Amino acid sequence: MSYDSNKVDRLSELISSFVCHASSHLPDDVNTRLAQMREVETEGFAPAIYNVMAKNMEMADELGRPSCQDTGIPQFFVRVGTGWPFLNEIEPSLIEAIKKATVRAPLRHNAVEVFDEYNTGSNIGHKVPWIDWELVQDSDELELFFYMAGGGCSLPGMAKVLMPLEGYDGIARAVFDQMTTYGVNACPPGLVGIGIAGSAEVAAKLSKKALLRPVGSHNPNLKAAQMEKDIEEGLNSIGLGPGGFGGRMSVMGVNIEQAARHPATLAVGMSTACWAHRRAGIRIHPDMSYDFFTHKGVTL
Ligand code: SF4
């Protein structure tokens, strides 16, 4: 692939700063939600755990260091306008940005090559960083979401295809089975993303995209929004609490995304984010000015 190395330098510098900031600062919506949840928990270990989380974030900011030792597998979700002028430069810039951020942040080396079983030592590997692409008509902007997919928060993930007669109860059952078995691994309180579709891979991908939506937002379909509220209420009753030490609330929220399904299948996918939900979104214009919309007021 041919690309302009000067443009790759400019873009990768900006994206590397964006990644470094995301590694040590939670997005605004997550900070707001954690502060609200901290108010609700008054008994047992829960208040102390929330205090430790707040102190952890304060120190990450003060020391300019990642907020968790597990900086995850780097994942980018790209929405690129058909009028964006530097299409060839995006992928090399993302790879270069991760190389730079791995040294600067620093990010723990997490890319282990499957079958060859060695750690690449750079967070670059076969299809890592993971890049998901979407084209946007009539736009000349590049919108990027960056997500650090940690080990613990990825563990409860699953996708399966149900018989349609299992219905929406079957979807809820699959989510509750996972959360009551593996939810504690995802350092609660996390965000639960659910994808509903006709096949496993679409449901899985949608469940991850659901995690990119703000905490507290709701699906525009009223029935889906109701299901988000019902599952959230149910998951809060399982009592995981912050850090899994017990408490009144176990999740920050539940986000559902859906695609029309095949008449004979009902697929469910689930992805979980932990309390340190390091998800960051930026919109970059062709002149390289930007809007860091998940972390307001931050200059990179
Ligand atoms: S689940 Fe999240 S907070 Fe817990 S160790 Fe993994 S990345 Fe860190």
Image (cartoon, helix red, strand yellow):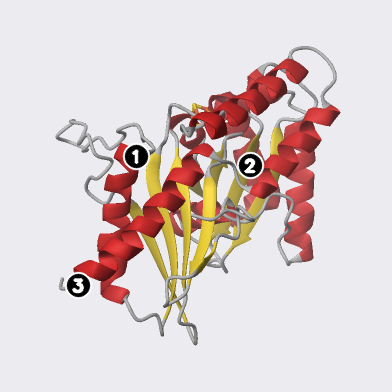
Where disc 2 sits, the SS reads strand
Q: Residue at x 49, y 39 (%)?
A: 157
> What separation in Å lies between label 3 and label 1 (alpha carbons)?
25 Å
Q: Is residue 234 left or right of residue 11?
A: right
Amino acid type, residue under disc 1 in the picture: Arg
Amino acid type, residue under disc 2 in the picture: Leu
Mark 2 sits on what residue? 191
Mark 1 sits on what residue? 104
Question: How many marks overall?
Answer: 3
Sequence-first disc among 3 and 1: 3
Quarter of the image where one finds residue 101: top left
State the mark number for residue 3.
3
**Mark 1 residue CB less than 8 A from any atom of ligand 1:** no
Q: Observer-nearest residue: 223 or 266?
A: 223
Q: Residue at x 67, y 28 (%)?
A: 54
Residue 227 point in image, percent of width and height: 75, 52
**Mark 2: few, some, or many residues within 10 Å (few <14, many ≥20)?**
many
